[in-house]
Amino acid sequence: MHIGLVGLGKMGANMRQRIRDAGLEVTGFDRNPEVSDVPTLEAMVEALPAGERVVWVMVPSGPITDAVVQDLAGLLTAGDLVIDGGNSYYQDDEPHAALLAERGIGFIDAGVSGGIWGLENGYGLMVGGASRDVERAMPVFDALRPPGERADGFVHAGPVGAGHYAKMVHNGIEYGLMQAYAEGYELLAAKGLVTDVPATMRAWSTGTVVRSWLLDLLVQALEEDPKFGAIDDWVEDSGEGRWTVDEAIDLAVPAPVISAALFARFSSRQGESPAMKAVAALRQQFGGHAVRAAGAATVTPSAPPTSEA
């Protein structure tokens, strides 16, 4: 199988490598010529078999994704398939699918979780689209997902839009989990009774009911910088937390934990907060997201912990 991949950033480049490692052929295009396999999007399309093309789009959500889908609609032909694997808003999926369908081109929306460690661990995948399109792309999904049973790392969540909706809720839950760990860290550090906070949290990482990959990442971040002195406590929100809260409001579904975690990120922009330093460190550990340096230090994530939840 030979696919095209548009967008070779932090996740896209790793996904290209993981797909190649599985024995599939990938032609990648990126506006950065240093990482791109071909000079133009047109050249990428020409490298794929007409009428059988599968193109995975891995670019920032919003106008950039809109533009790439528009361009592909003019370059691809009937029988081809586009997969949007970025963090797009689920309500954008149906218009994209409709635009491509006018030209006989299929569309799948794919929520992708795994961050910068997906190359080694695999990616959790949540996809939406027609069954025939999903089945056609299954070799790619199998290449990207974690080893083991398919159902443990892949789901065909429903029709177009379902994949990105599932990923949106996933990220909302992630907000709440990260905030809980961060507040627990601050409580341990504030009392002074616990003399080794990193070791205490590490002791939770096996056997306890709060063990998880996020906890492993927080322990790793603490071991690298025990008091988070090298980073600022400013924490961005990527949009999906807001979308999740908006959806909860629209559906009258109580979501106090996710909502509070979102607003806590806003509070990080109003003054120093140890808990928000912990959230910033977690985002960097699992996703390679930029953090604001405290002073002149630059913080980069190291190799991931071996366990994942």
Image (tube, rainbow, N blue to C red):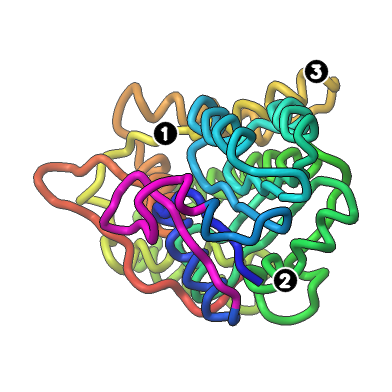
Q: What element carries label 3?
A: helix
Q: Give how far across and how far down residue 96 sits, in percent.
A: 70, 31
Label located before the other in sequence (2 or 1): 2
Magenta stretch holds residue 42: yes
Q: In this view, does 232 lie to the left or right of 59?
A: left
| Residue at mark 3 | 250
Q: Residues within 10 Å of mark 2 (few under 14, many from 20)?
A: some
Q: Give how far across and how far down residue 139 sits, in percent.
A: 72, 71
Span of residues in magenta: 24-44
Q: Give how far across and how far down residue 3 sits, in percent.
A: 60, 62
Q: Is residue 279 left or right of residue 277?
A: right
Query: Looking at the picture, which amino acid does disc 1 mark?
Result: Glu
Foreground label between 2 and 3: 2
| Residue at mark 1 | 236
Compared with 288, 91 (above or below) is above
Foreground of the two, 102 or 19: 102
Residue at x-position 74% and y-position 81%: 148
Label located before the other in sequence (3 or 1): 1
Q: Is mark 1 on a helix, strand or loop?
A: loop
| Residue at mark 2 | 139
Residue at x-position 78% and y-position 50%: 79
Residue at x-position 89% and y-position 56%: 132
C-alpha span from label 2 to label 3:
37 Å
